[in-house]
Image (spheres, rainbow, N blue to C red):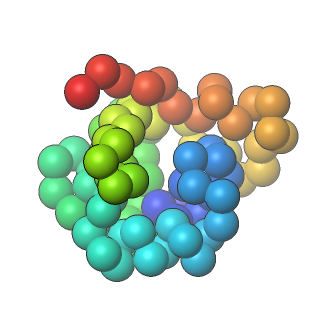
Amino acid sequence: MRLDKWLKISRLIKRRTVANEACDNQRVTANGRPVKASYDVKVGDVLELRFGERTVKVEVLSVAEHVGKADAPALYKELLS
């Protein structure tokens, strides 16, 4: 699944266009390197998102096409940076 779509479905970023812009501005890294929005997310990937001064680091636990709001946090595990 594309990175921008996964970020929206996991609700780490609210809109796919915002996720796309974050990737274009190199604020998203996968396994330590900057990636584009078209990056194929796989289980086990470690994603790092930078929001201003705040950095969120997560490990991908699941990739699903449709997820309810309550189940979205089950797609990833937040890691301590």
* Residue 38 seen in the figure: no
- Whether residue 19 is situated above or below residue 75 in the rendered picture: below
In percent of the image, x 80 and y 39: which residue is there? 69
- Whether residue 18 is situated above or below residue 53 in the rendered picture: below
On the picture, is 70 further left or further right than 49? right
On the picture, is 81 further left or further right than 3? left
In percent of the image, x 26 and y 55: which residue is there? 29
- Whether residue 10 is situated above or below residue 72 in the rendered picture: below
- Residue 70's x, y, as percent? 81, 30
On the picture, is 4 further left or further right than 52? right
Q: Which residue is nearer to you in this view: 22 or 75?
A: 22
On the picture, is 26 further left or further right than 7? left
In percent of the image, x 47 and y 25: which residue is there? 77
Quarter placement of the C terminus: top left
Furthest-top residue in this view: 80
Furthest-front residue in this view: 53
Number of numbered markers: 0
- Whether residue 61 is situated above or below residue 66 in the rendered picture: above
Q: Which residue is nearer to you in this view: 36 or 81?
A: 81
- Residue 14's x, y, as percent? 66, 58
Q: Which residue is nearer to you in this view: 18 or 7?
A: 18
The quarter of the displayed image where residue 27 is located: bottom left
* Residue 24 seen in the figure: yes
- Residue 78's x, y, as percent? 43, 26
- Residue 24's x, y, as percent? 34, 78
